[in-house]
Amino acid sequence: MIVLVFFALVAAAIVAYPPDDLYLWVKALHIVAVISWMAGLLYLPRLFIYHTDAAKGSELSETFMTMERRLYRVIMNPAMMLSWVLGLYLAWSVYRFQGGWLHAKLAFVVVLTAVHVFFGRCIVAFAQDANRFSARQWRFLNEMPALLMVLIVIMVVVKPFSG
């Protein structure tokens, strides 16, 4: 929570007193938001794996439910929203939404957002003791955010469809 407050204060200061290098500040905050979002997307399915092995209704299962809910609401949701807002600002201010690589990157980010929403629905399913996936299936699903992250980074750094 302290990090979110600090992030908000930095963002407010940037809006109130725009620096000459506003682009660099927005880019830095975007990177921090993306790292936070990805950390949650990579960690949450691991929690699901362990939660799947916990007995329904047990104290351990209840602990996992609390951890999953807090991770999603307190870290992942704000980080995703900030990633989108700051990323769209950068895409418009720097590239005017032009470039095949940017369109591909945005498409992968849309899929990553769908994974985020899917994980949110799975949190609800776990809370209702209605998980439909085995630990082995969760291990496979755990790879989706990592694969999308690799594709997104390649689009941003290599820009394979520019030109």
Image: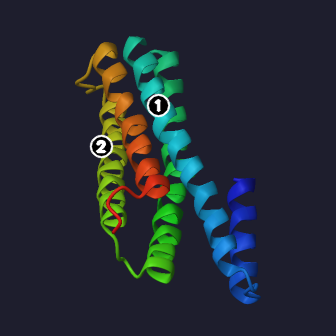
Residue 2 against residue 127 in the figure, above or below: below
Say which element carries label 1: helix
Residue 58 against residue 37 in the figure, above or below: above
Quadrant of residue 142 in the image?
Answer: top left
Residue underneath mark 1: 65
Residue 30 against residue 143 in the figure, above or below: below
Residue at image position (68%, 85%) is 15
Which quadrant holds the C terminus?
bottom left
Furthest-front residue in this view: 163
Residue mark closest to the camera, 1 vs 2: 2
Whether tag 1 and tag 2 are in contact, CB under 8 A, the answer is no
Mark 2: few/some/many CA within 10 Å (<14, 14-19, 20+)? few
Residue 162's x, y, as percent?
A: 35, 65
Quadrant of residue 21 in the image?
Answer: bottom right
Residue at image position (53%, 58%) is 78
On residue 118, the disc is: 2
Residue 89's x, y, as percent?
A: 49, 77
Out of 111 and 154, give the one closest to the viewer. Answer: 154
Q: Is residue 113 left or right of residue 130?
A: right
Residue at image position (31%, 14%) is 136
Could you tell me how far apart the alpha carbons at marks 1 and 2 are, in whole angstroms? 16 Å
Mark 2: amino acid? Phe
Sequence-wise first label, 1 or 2: 1
Furthest-left residue in this view: 132
Mark 1: amino acid? Met
Mark 1: few/some/many CA within 10 Å (<14, 14-19, 20+)? many
Residue at image position (54%, 25%) is 63
On residue 34, the disc is: none
Residue 76 against residue 8 in the figure, above or below: above
Quadrant of residue 129 in the image?
Answer: top left
Out of 47 and 125, give the one closest to the viewer. Answer: 47
